[in-house]
Image (cartoon, rainbow, N blue to C red):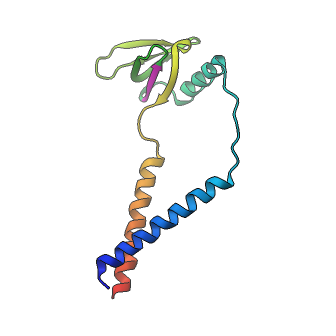
Amino acid sequence: MSRTSLVGRCVLLVTLAFQTLAPSQALGQQIKMRPVPTQQQKEEQWKHELEQKGIGEKSKWEARLQDGRKIKGYLSEIREDGFTLVNTKTDENSRVAFSELKSLKRQGLPWQVPAGIAGAVFGGLVVAGLVAASRE
């Protein structure tokens, strides 16, 4: 048996394992309906999230407004009725009222993404090492 076909079979087995496990986990979970939050609840949650992450150039956000505009920048001020984002390229200040917001999300990759990629690479190296060791 050639090395290529052995590696291909290992990849196939891992793929099949993931395909069979994912649906079985999804079927075991019950669907829970959450009540739709009111605009006031959303505004309170956004304000709390902004306060928790803090002000400064490392606190970057993307605000989508009800009228379809998108504003990106770092958080420079939090007020009772809204906040201010500063565009890093133009230094333009944009005051945003919580009542204008459609959605608010933090910019940048969460730590789970690089950790997941590193785990996948490590797992691939382990499988390749096992395959190479079995050939000897």
Residue at image location 60% in from the left, 19% down from the top: 43
Considering depth in this image, is 105 or 59 the residue closer to the camera?
105
Residue 44 lies within the magenta run: no
- Quarter residue 93 falls in: top left
Instruction: Give the residue displayed 46% in from the left and 71% down from the top.
Output: 13
Residue 26 in picture, x, y percent from top left: 62, 53
Residue 39 in which image quadrant: top right
Percent of width and height locating residue 52: 57, 29
Left-right relation of 103 to 89: right
User: x, y percentage for residue 95?
Assistant: 45, 11
Above or below residue 91? Residue 118 is below
Q: Which residues are magenta?
A: 59-64
- Asked if 93 appears above or below 1 in the picture, the reply is above
Residue 55 vs residue 89: left or right?
right
| Residue at x-position 66% and y-position 21% | 41
- What is the quadrant of the N terminus in the image? bottom left
In front of the other: 103 or 48: 103
Q: Does 63 lie within the magenta span?
A: yes
Q: Is residue 128 above or below residue 40?
A: below
Residue name at image x 35 percent, y 72 percent: 8
Q: Is residue 18 left or right of residue 40?
A: left
